[in-house]
Amino acid sequence: MMNQLLKNLNERQQEAVQATEGSVRIIAGAGSGKTRVIAHRYAYLVNVLGVDPGNILCMTFTNKAAQEMKHRISRLVDSGLVTDYVCTIHGFCVKFLRKEIHRLGYPKTFTILDDEDKKAMVKRIMEAMNIDRKKSTVNKHLAHIGKTKGKMRMDYVAQFMLPHSKAEPKADMQFFCNYLKEQLRLFAVDFDDLMYFTLYILHNFPEVCKEWQSELNYLQIDEVQDCDADEWELFTILSGGLGNLCVVGDPDQAIYEWRGSRPQLFVDFHADTDIVLNQNYRSTPDILDVANAIISHNRNRVPKDLFTEKPRAVRVVHYHADDDSKECKWIADTIAKAVKKGKGTYGEIAILFRAAYLSRGVEQELIKNGIPYAVWGGIRFFERKEIKDALSYLRLIANPNDDLAFLRVCNVPSRKFGKKSLEWLMRRAENLEQPMSLYETLSAFIDSPELRRTQMADFVKEIEAGRTLIAKGCGIGSTLDQVLTSSGLKEEYRSDEDEDRLENITELLHSIKDYENSLRLGEEPVSLDDYLQDIALYTNADYRNNEDAVKLMTIHQAKGLEFPYVFVMGLNEGVFPSHRAIRERLKAAEEEERRLMYVAATRAERELILTESEGYSAANQCGKFPSRFLMEIPENIIDVKRKIPPHIYMNAKAMIDELNDQLGIESYDDNPSSEVPASAADDGAIHIGDIVKHTVFGQGTVVGVKPNGSCEVQFASGVRTLLPRVLTKE
Ligand code: ATP
Ligand code: MG
């Protein structure tokens, strides 16, 4: 039984599985079997040591990863049974609170607030406190509430969120306290509260804490590099009984520092047993070389000697396109051809990107080509709220009889046209002798006293202005841009700091302008009706739940997962690395973005394809240039399908230098340059992972190859950078 379980693991993995007692740290690179070890360790505890699954808590970071973990474990444990204690950290807090929250006077059926609920609550309080929405926005209040909770931690629970709390809020905390009071009235908690309520109970009810500690005999935490200090506190307390805590992670994959994760806690953790895994089982050496070349540019890291025994196969591909639509078209064509040839199935392919708005172009191409796809952990571009709203404005401009479009946007943004006013309008429209649409009825009765307190006259003006612009031959994109501006919708997103929505809207406007440019014949404008008809192909795209579908997701969503074929698209400076992040957090952000690139590259098993394009970036309002990460990959380990023109290289470098100068951050010595050697790989070329010999330093492993060809070699005495001619391959 034991042999069965251990036989599919290498020696170090076996050691990790069998190290069940005390604190254990497994620190290892991507694809080295960390998650596999956790699943086997769970099964080992149950099958071999006879531990009841109810006594094991196994936590990870995302819902998808938790599902995947459950699935892996259920195939390994004898009974096939897995408890609910294989979950995310927040998932655990929910289970804990359902059992224990009654101690704070809350019912176990407490409500969990999602983002929309929270926004609605803030709006209600703003109204009740007579706060002008122009002066202070919903998102600002929400951000402030989150920050205050993070600062006060369990204190805010004690002071304001217990039924008997009597603390009187200071004047500057009035809004915060009113919000908490409302939460208490509804017995509703948000994600922050899940953590702080749990910690509060564990700290203030010693007998409860003891009970859980004696129940949870074994704890395993995956992806621990992304945990914050509160999460560390939680699992440190919970494992306080027997002290059997196993933490697993990879500091090179820490990608949540921007929202408070503390990878250093993992690096500094002193465990009874420390295990390093260094064999990668996921990717080909060709993929690993690229991933290692990229991550070796980070200064703030501990170098690893990750290797693989897989045979060399297909080199990583880089494709450069003239513009984003050609980039997306090439991706769709490549997928269609590969699947047709029987090389793989749609379900084996993932397309990853840095920002959600980037999915627009590729979704359109996939739909055009009839390629089934699914957006994981997100919403299809044309189903996103702001996109549907924007298109509804256009539909109403094209056709005042479109009641559905009217209903979508008549009160977006708010024009004080609530449910009652709408009911009045609907009755009005129904009772007319000559039936009229809602919009027409509104225009006809705009002076009615029932509408006096609303701002619907402005709405009619905006739609009519749009119609006039279209009639005068103004472009569709420009018209929509003006309508979204005059309606106040853009401003609302901007002042709410709703960056995702703004990015999506910008992307839509950009795509409409592209569409018009590609179709415009002479001076004739493209007709709005034609556009709406064409776009309906995408907005009404029929999709069923199809297992065999290409998966689209942001890189953050892809963490911990693996796919045979991976495209990473939109590899442009500004987008990836995100210049917004770099402006905010300087070098720390650049390194975090590079780790994100490392995560992206290491998702691939068989083939990795990197794409980018030139042209204009609407999101960044500047020309598009290739990402520095692409230029950090030595040319001799990558298959460049279409070369980047030299002037684009130069401009990319100039852009990076300028940003660094502006922000006063250090450039790398080996900064990407246009002089990247165009050498193709020759037989004697040294690759990452190669074992090499040096006459003085002895044997070592190549851990990095720089663009100028020099190699970083890990010797027993440390890492040295050397010219390839002084090294002989073993
Ligand atoms: P990440 O850092 O991306 O989370 P990981 O270290 O958790 O990666 P896993 O997902 O556990 O790595 O493993 C990567 C792949 O390698 C999986 O498909 C896994 O089944 C396989 N694998 C790991 N160890 C072995 C082994 N000893 N024999 C065969 N396959 C293995
Ligand atoms: Mg993993």
Image (cartoon, grey):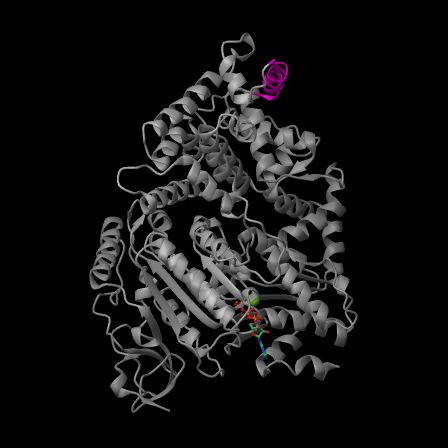
Is residue 606 found left or right of 665 in the rendered image? right
Q: Quadrant of the N terminus?
A: bottom right
Q: In the image, residue 707 lies at what x, y percent?
A: 27, 72
- Res 125 quadrant in image: top right
The residue most toward the top is: 449
Is residue 428 found left or right of 676 in the rendered image? right
Tell me what residue is drawn at x 32 percent, y 32 percent. Answer: 474
Q: Quadrant of ligand 2?
A: bottom right
* Of residues 280 and 651, the one drawn nearer to the viewer in this rendering: 651
Tell me what residue is drawn at x 24 percent, y 61 percent. Answer: 649
Vertical comparison of 639 with 381: above or below: below
Q: In the image, residue 395 lies at what x, y percent?
A: 47, 32
Res 72 visible? yes
Q: Is residue 427 magenta?
A: yes
* Of residues 395 and 324, the one drawn nearer to the viewer in this rendering: 395
Tell me what residue is drawn at x 64 percent, y 29 percent. Answer: 182
Vertical comparison of 180 with 42: above or below: above
- Res 437 quadrant in image: top right
Q: In the image, residue 458 lies at what x, y percent?
A: 44, 19
Vertical comparison of 454 with 380: above or below: above
Principal secondary structure, stretch drawn in magenta: helix
The magenta segment: 418-433
